Amino acid sequence: MKKLLLSFIVLMSFSLQLRADEGMWIPMLLQNNEQEMQEMGMNITVEDIYSINNSSMKDAVVLFGGGCTGEIVSEQGLLLTNHHCGYSWIQYHSTVEHDYLTDGFWAMSFEEELPCPGLTAVMLKSMKDVTNFVLEGVTKDTPNDERARIVSENIKKVKEEAEATTNYQVVIKPFYHGNKYYMIYNEVFKDVRMVGTPPSNIGKFGGDTDNWVWPRHTGDFSIFRIYVSPEGEAVEYSEDNVPYKPNYHFPISLKGAEKGDFTFVFGYPARTNEYLPAVAVDQEANVINPVSVDLRGKILDIYNKHQEKDPKVRIQYASKHASLGNGWKKWMGVTEGINNFKGVQKKKAFDEKFTAWAYKSRQRGAYLTLISDFEKVYAEYEPYRLAITYLSETALNIEILTFAAEFNKLSQVTKDTPQEEIDEMIAAAKEATKVFFKDYYQPIDEEVAVAMLTEYIANQPADFRPELLNTIEKKYDNVEAYVEELFAKTMFTSEEGIYQFLDEFKASKAKKLAKDPALMAYNNVMDFYLANVREKASDINSQIADMQRVFMRGQMEYYADQEPEKRMYPDANFTLRVTYGKIGGFSPRDAVNYKHFTTLDGIMQKENPDIYDYVVTDRLRELYENKDYGRYADKDGSMHVAFIAGNHTTGGNSGSPILNADGHLLGLNFDRTWEGTMSDLIYDPSICKNISVDIRYVLFIIDKYAGATRLVDEMTIVE
Ligand code: ARG
Ligand code: ASP
C-alpha cells in the first residue's frame, strides 16, 4: 500500500512537472503563474516582470527587426540579440574592405556606431483585453462570413478610437484562435544602430552543421543600440539623436547557473499550434513534412557535392544552403519527435475524450461532430497542401525559373508603355541580374532541375499537374533531355547576354522575352497554381480556421469542466510572452545523456581549419591556451559557452533574454534541440529544450577577445 501511495505521489508530481515547463504566458496575466514560479525557485514577483504603473522588465524587451527578440542591457539603450538576428545588418554594412561577417565589428565610440535604415525595435507599453468590443454583435450562431465581417469592422473602430488618443502604435491581435482579442500599445524605435558583432566563426560557429543540434558551441550574439531624439522621442535616424534612456535594463549575472536552477525567457514567440486535432498533426508530421524533407534533402545533397568540390561555390551557396537546411532539419526533428512520442495517438485519445464529453450536455452541440468534420476537411485539404508543397519545394527551387520571373513585367511591355516605366524595369532587371549571378552556379541548378522536375512529375496526380509536366513526359525522352534543352535555349544563363539584351531592349522585343523557355516554364506552373489551387486552398484554410476557433473554445470549456486546475495559454502569435523552466540536460534516446552546458574545450575539439564551420581564430586559441578568462570563467575554471533548459520557446524567441531566479541575465536564447522541435505542435518536457549562449561567453568575447571593454563598462554586472 505504501509503495502504491509512493508511486502515486511520484506520478502526481511528475504530471505537475509536466505542466510546469509548458506554456507561453501573457505577461499581463502572470499572476496566475506566480505561485508556481516561486515554488520552482523564482525570487522576484511577477509585478517585477510586468507592471503597468512602475518600471519593470517588460521595459527592456523588444521585438527586434520584426522577427527576433532583443533586450536592453544598459542605461544608454544598449541592446543584445543573436548574431543570426543581426546577420542581414552585418552583411549590409560589410564590404570587401570591411568584411564584418568574416572579421567582426566593434564600434569603439558612439560615433562609430552604424545606422541601419529600416531596422526597428518595438517595445510593448501596455495591453488590454478588448474581446467584448471586438466580438460585439457576434453570437455562437453567427455564420462565419458574417462573423468575419463584424469582427473586422469592430477591430477597425476600436483601433481608430484608440489611435485618436495616443502616439503609440496600436495593434489588435486574436488570441486563442479568435476567442479573445487584445489591444497592444507599442513604442516603435526607428533609429537602431549596429554596435558590435563577433566574427562569423564565433557568432555562427558550427554553422548549419550544428544548427538545431545539441551540444552546441555558437557565440550567437550581436550588439545594437537604440537612439531617440534629444527630447526622448522615437524618431527616424538623425545625427542629433542620442542614446535611449530606458525605464529598465537587465542586470547581468556572472554567477552562472546550475542544473535544476529556475530560469525564464521573455520574448516574442512567432507561431505555435498546440491545440490541433490529431488529423492535423498527423498530416503535418507524416504527410507534408516528409515530402518537404525528402525534396530538400535531395537539393542539399546536390549543393553539398558541389560545395565540397569548390570553395567559391561553398560561399555562393552558403546562405541558400542555410535557409533550405533550417526547415529541412527542423521538420525532420518534428516528425521524429511526434512519432517517438506517439503524439498522434495521444491527440487522438484526447479527441475521443473531447467528443464523448461533448455528448454529455445539450450545451455542447457545436462540438459533437467537430472531430469527424476536421477529418473530412483535412482529407479534402491534403492534395491542395501537397500541391502547394510540391510547387514551392520543386519548381520554385529551380533558380533559373524564379530568376526568369523577375523579367515578367518587361515581357508584357507594349508600344504604349511609357519609356520611363520601361527604363525603371530595365534598371530593376539589371540589378536582379547582378544579384543573381553573384551566387549562381549553373551545374547545381541543372542537377536540381532534373531532380525536382522528376519528383514533381512522379508525385502529382492528374488534377494537380501543370501542363509543363505532361509536356515533358510526352515530348521528351526523359527529364534530362528537357532540362538540357531548357538550359541551352534560355537566355537567362548568360549574364552578358542579358545585359546586352537589356541595353538594346525595345517594346518589340517583349514577345521574344515572353517566349523564353525558362519564363514560360515558370508561368506555366504559376498560372496553374493561381487557376486551380490557390483559391480552393485558401477557402479550405479559412474553413479550418473557423473550426479551429470553435475547437479552441471547446477545449477551454472542456478543461474548465474536467481539469479546472489546468491553466491554458494561447498559441504564440508574435506577442510578448514569458515562459519558464529549469536548467538541465536530457536523454534524447536510449543510452544517450546530454549534459546541460558546453565549454570552450568543445570548440577546440571541433576545431578544423579545413572545415569552414569549424575554423577557430588564433586569438581565441591563444585565450584558451592561456586560460585567460578573467572574471568570466565558471567556478569550475572553464569557459562555459552554451546551456539548455526546459523553456517553451519557438521561432522569434531568438535573442530573447534567459533570466535567473533574480531576473538577472544568464544568456541569450537562440535555438532548440532538434529532438524537441515538435514543441510547436506538442510539448514534451523530457526532450523539448531551449538552447542559450552563456552571457559570460558573450562578455568574454566582447571584453577579452575584442577589447570592446567600453561596452561591458556600461552594463550592470552582478558578480
Ligand atoms: N535554428 C535556428 C532558428 O530557427 C537558428 C538558425 C540560424 N543559424 C544557422 N546556422 N542557420 O532560427
Ligand atoms: N532559432 C529560432 C529563431 O530564430 C528559435 C527557435 O526556433 O527555437 O527564432
Image (cartoon, helix red, strand yellow):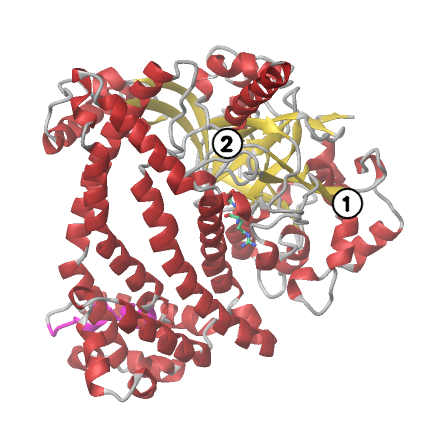
Q: What is the three-letter code of the residue carrying label 1?
A: Gly
Nearer the observer, 8 or 709: 8
Q: Which residue is mark 1?
A: 707
* Residues in magenta, as a range: 402-415
Secondary structure at badge 1 equals loop
Whether pointer 1 and pointer 2 mark residues with C-beta atoms closer than 8 Å, the reply is no
Residue 301 visible in the current orientation: yes
Quadrant in which the C terminus appears: top right
Residue that appears at 31% across and 58% down: 389
Label 2 neighbour load within 10 Å: few <14, some 14-19, many 20+? many
Q: Amino acid at mark 2?
A: Gly
Q: Position of residue 586 (x, y in %)?
A: 63, 39
Relative vertical location of residue 537 with respect to residue 584 in this rendering, above or below:
below
Image quadrant where residue 691 sits: top right
Of 524 and 184, which appears nearest the observer?
524
User: Where is 360 relative to 382, above or below?
Assistant: above
* Residue at 16 percent of width and 79 percent of height: 511
Q: Nearer the viewer, residue 499 or 445?
A: 445
Classify 510 as above or below 427: below
Q: CA distance from mark 1 to mark 2?
A: 29 Å
Question: Which element carries disc 2, helix, strand or loop?
Answer: strand
Q: Residue drawn at (36%, 78%), measured in percent from left and top?
A: 450
Magenta-span inclusion, residue 409: yes
Of label 1 and label 2, which has the lower sequence position? 2
Residue farthest toward the front in the current orientation of the protein = 1
**Nearer the viewer's eye, disc 1 or disc 2?**
2
Does any atom of ligand 2 lie closer than 8 Å to the CB of label 2?
A: no
With 501 as the anchor, is 34 left or right in this view?
right
Residue pointed to by mark 2: 267
Q: Is residue 361 above or below residue 641?
A: above
- Quarter of the figure with the N terminus: top right
In this rendering, position of residue 256 left or right of residue 248: right
